[in-house]
Image: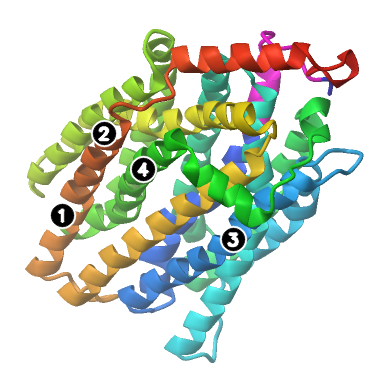
Amino acid sequence: MKPPLRGVPLSRWTKGVYALGDLSSNTILSTLSLVFTSYFLVEVAGLRPVLAGLVPLVGRIVDAITDPLMGRISDRTRWRIGRRRPYFLIGALPLGVFFALIWANPTGLGEWGKLGYYIAVYCALMCAMTVVSVPYLALQPEMALDYDERTSLNAYRSVGSVLGIIVALALRPLAEYLGGGETGFRMAGLWLGGLLVVPWLAVYATSFERPDFTRRASGLSFAGAMGACWRQRAFRRLVGLYLAGRVAIDLTGVMLVLYFTHWLGRSRDFEITMLVFLLSSAAALPVWLAVSRRVDKATAFIIGACWWMVGQIGMLFVEPEWSRWILFATAPLVAAGYAAVDLMPWAMLGEVVDEDELVTNERREGVYNGLFTFLRKLAGAAAVFVALGILDFSGLEAGVPAGETTRRAVRVLATLAPAACLIVAVAFARGYPLTRARHDAVVAELLLAQSRRSPSDGRA
């Protein structure tokens, strides 16, 4: 597909198909956080909560190498069909295979043997995801060059992300339909693993790369490129607000099923409430797009984070005997703030890459996105490990009714802990230096530099 000229918006079809990549990857991430770690490993596989929390933590340590390295590899790839898109074909099939394997419950292994199995398959799954997701995310600032067009493309991605979470919410009911227990989850993993391969073929066929971006090879070493990222003030601030916001999202995701199960005593209401929440967050995206055209993206992020924080704190006061319709009714209000926290940071990363290009004359989307992705995974996994460790210490056990100490721990970890993370995110977002005005100046300087190059080297 031929890339459009600067200033020409992407078609809705292109944005929609591109968003299918997020549907696939977020289905995996959401099943791992919503179902696998806190429910499947504890209730089905029979691991202690602290050991269950160790599985994703080890996987994130592996990501410390693979995510930035994959970004660097894609930055330096010079294949005829592109430097990012070929990896969608390379990684798609392993992604589906390892996703299916992670829902098996191997027999004949003790608790430590199962732990080793799940760590190995989890790490393999994360490596396969890295192969497709890091180049996929690195394409964003290349496909959409404009400040607002990037927000629009990420809004479509957010819709794909929401759909992925909805698919993830269907995993438990699907497993029950297919027989329940070990058999049900194994069959659900096989079916879903096969389906998750297909979107990457569509993304490969519809996405594109810009020849000028591909021709400019990086002259820095891997260590030098990583150091250049960290020296950029806007990137450090963006990492701070993004990580704090994502930890709030991850904590909420992993704790909500336990909140409904052990605090409210209504486990089956979890999927219904989450469905209302996710559909509401998708419906709020056009509103945030309109807001981001009138204020800087960091300001929109702050508004959304504060909105969500108030709703999260409100959940602290919900009592088990209250009507189930209270949470159904308040979910859309909380979802509106969540939508901004989820949307804005990825829309802001493209401007960081542009500012970096102005200084270095290199396009290093891969390194930036690889580093961004790894830090997000590590922070979320560490927070989940700590949360599950607290629950393990409080006495949470599979098949045993939760005591009062455990119930109160679940209540706090599902409400106040995410709210505290959002306060930190707002602190990082205040005074964010890469505003719309600053980006306009960066683009003007980049266009001036482009005009000085020969026509054959001009950007599409």
Name the foreground residue: 276 vs 343: 343
> What stretch of residues is rendered in magenta?
3-19
> Which is closer to the viewer, label 3 or label 1?
3
Badge 1 density bin: few <14, some 14–19, many ≥20, Cα 10 Å: many
Q: Is residue 277 above or below residue 71?
A: above
Residue occupied by mark 2: 426
Secondary structure found at label 3: helix
The structure residue drawn at horizontal position 31% and vertical position 39%, both measured from the top left corner, is 273
Residue occupied by mark 1: 411
Badge 2 density bin: few <14, some 14–19, many ≥20, Cα 10 Å: many
Tell whether 246 sits left or right of 326: right
Name the foreground residue: 135 vs 437: 437
Name the foreground residue: 339 vs 61: 61
| Position of residue 254 measured from the top left corner of the image (x, y, whole percent) | 34, 55
Q: Which mark is residue 240?
A: 4
Q: The residue under label 2 is which amino acid type?
A: Val
> Which is closer to the viewer, label 2 or label 3?
2
Task: Specify which label sits upstream in the sequence, 2 or 1.
Answer: 1
Residue occupied by mark 3: 126
Picture quadrant of residue 117:
bottom right
Task: Specify which label sits upstream in the sequence, 3 or 4.
Answer: 3
| Position of residue 239 measured from the top left corner of the image (x, y, whole percent) | 42, 42
Secondary structure found at label 4: helix
